[in-house]
Amino acid sequence: MIYEPREDSELLQRWVRKLVQGKVLDMGTGSGIQALAALENTKDVLAVDVNPECVAFVQKKGVSALESDLFSHVPGKFDWIIFNPPYLPEDIDEPEDSKLATTGGLVGDEILTAFLVLAKEHLTEKGNILLVMSDLTGEPEKLFKDYSWKCLENEKLFFEELGVYLLSLR
């Protein structure tokens, strides 16, 4: 299953178009919406996803892409890393095929936490992370404790509030 762009994707995409340039990694590319937005400002974009169906889908759109579980097969460092992580707490009634795109773990922050630990090694000295997450995922103060960060924009939906965050190395 390929994650269809929704409010979170569109919110993040606005900021990708405004800020992202240089060497870019689109982590968890899904439909490729963020990689395609980044390609409007730079030609140096690599999209990765754990789902081979997503990788093949974005490659057909002309995006350089590879299969990787987070950074397991990602070479090099990047000026920008974009991530729209699966950030919702596990719902035992959700079908397994959609959990890959939506569920961030039992609590909801496990994938994001693992990403944040590994991302440091893949950022250039002045590199940045641009990500979106839900208030259902956890508190930014705790999740982003190892980074300098700020919230760029919030959007309230009927059951959650989304935020776009800019993170950089301290």
Image (spheres, rainbow, N blue to C red):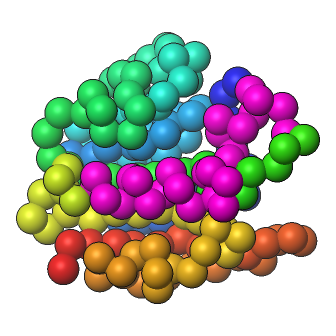
46, above or below 134, in the image: above
- Please say whether residue 18 is visible from this viewpoint: yes
45, above or below 130, in the image: above
Instruction: Tell me if residue 101 is in the magenta stretch.
Output: yes
User: Mostly what secondary structure, the magenta segment?
Assistant: helix
Q: Nearer the viewer, residue 48 or 113?
A: 113
Residue occupying the point 89% across, 71% down: 158
Instruction: Tell me if residue 85 is in the magenta stretch.
Output: no
* Residue 135 screen position, x and y as percent: 67, 75
Can you say which quadrant of the picture contains the C terminus?
bottom left
- Please say whether residue 58 is visible from this viewpoint: no
* Residue 71 screen position, x and y as percent: 31, 39
Residue occupying the point 74% across, 51% down: 90
Q: Nearer the viewer, residue 100 or 155?
A: 100
* Residue 13 screen position, x and y as percent: 54, 55
Q: Which region of the structure is painted magenta?
A: 94-119
Would you say 129 lies left or right of 85 here? left
Residue occupying the point 44% across, 17% down: 59
Can you say which quadrant of the picture contains the N terminus?
top right
* Residue 18 screen position, x and y as percent: 41, 65
